[in-house]
Amino acid sequence: MSYYDLEFKTETAFAAKLAAAAISGLNIYTGHDGDVKALPWAVIHAGQGEEFPPATANYKMNVSVEVASTSSGTTPEANHKAFVGSVRDAILVETLPADLSAAVADFTCPDAWQGTVESSVSEEHFVSTLNMNIIAANADL
């Protein structure tokens, strides 16, 4: 198993969850590349943390879902808030661990919880980042 397998599987599972929500117009991306992305977008980043609980092969994963949209147009802030609300509604559900576990082979998520939400605005973009933590394993349990 590669160190990055669990990060890839986590990002893929979250992307599948957002794709299933069918948020009209939202482009979904994963990873940490610097490619220019088509607005509006959601980018899922996952980083592997410590083994939790110790000696279990379960890892605490830090997941951020960054939502960006244009800050120009007739109602840009309202549009951005609608995208963020739709993303939150899609992933902040009681069934999230089971949904993530079902989305990717050899991947299990027994627990998930919400962290902070951060927002910023520039001349070109509104950006909101939903931070979460999950417990994940490289196996179907």
Image: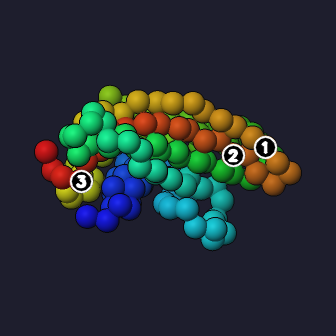
Asked if the residue at tag 2 contacts the one at tag 1, i.e. Cβ–Cβ closer than 8 Å, the answer is: yes
Secondary element at image label 3: loop
Spatial separation of the CA atoms under disc 2 and disc 3: 31 Å
Residue at 53% x, 38% y is 131
Tell me where residue 126 appears, x and y as whole percent.
73, 46
Indicate the amino acid at tag 2. Val
Closer-to-camera residue (72/93): 93
Closer-to-camera residue (56/39): 56
Tell me where residue 61 appears, x and y as whole percent.
40, 43
Q: Outermost residue, right direction?
A: 123
Residue 138 is tagged as 3
Q: How is the image coloured?
A: rainbow
Secondary element at image label 2: strand
Does residue 114 show up? yes
Tell me where residue 113 appears, x and y as whole percent.
41, 30
Indicate the amino acid at tag 3. Asn
Residue with the mark numbered 2: 127
- For residue 111, side relative to residue 61 (left or right): left
Q: Outermost residue, bottom direction?
A: 35
Residue at 37% x, 52% y is 10
Spatial separation of the CA atoms under disc 1 and disc 2: 6 Å
Q: Nearer the viewer, mark 2 or mark 3?
A: 3
Earlier residue among tags 1 and 2? 1
- For residue 26, side relative to residue 3 (left or right): right
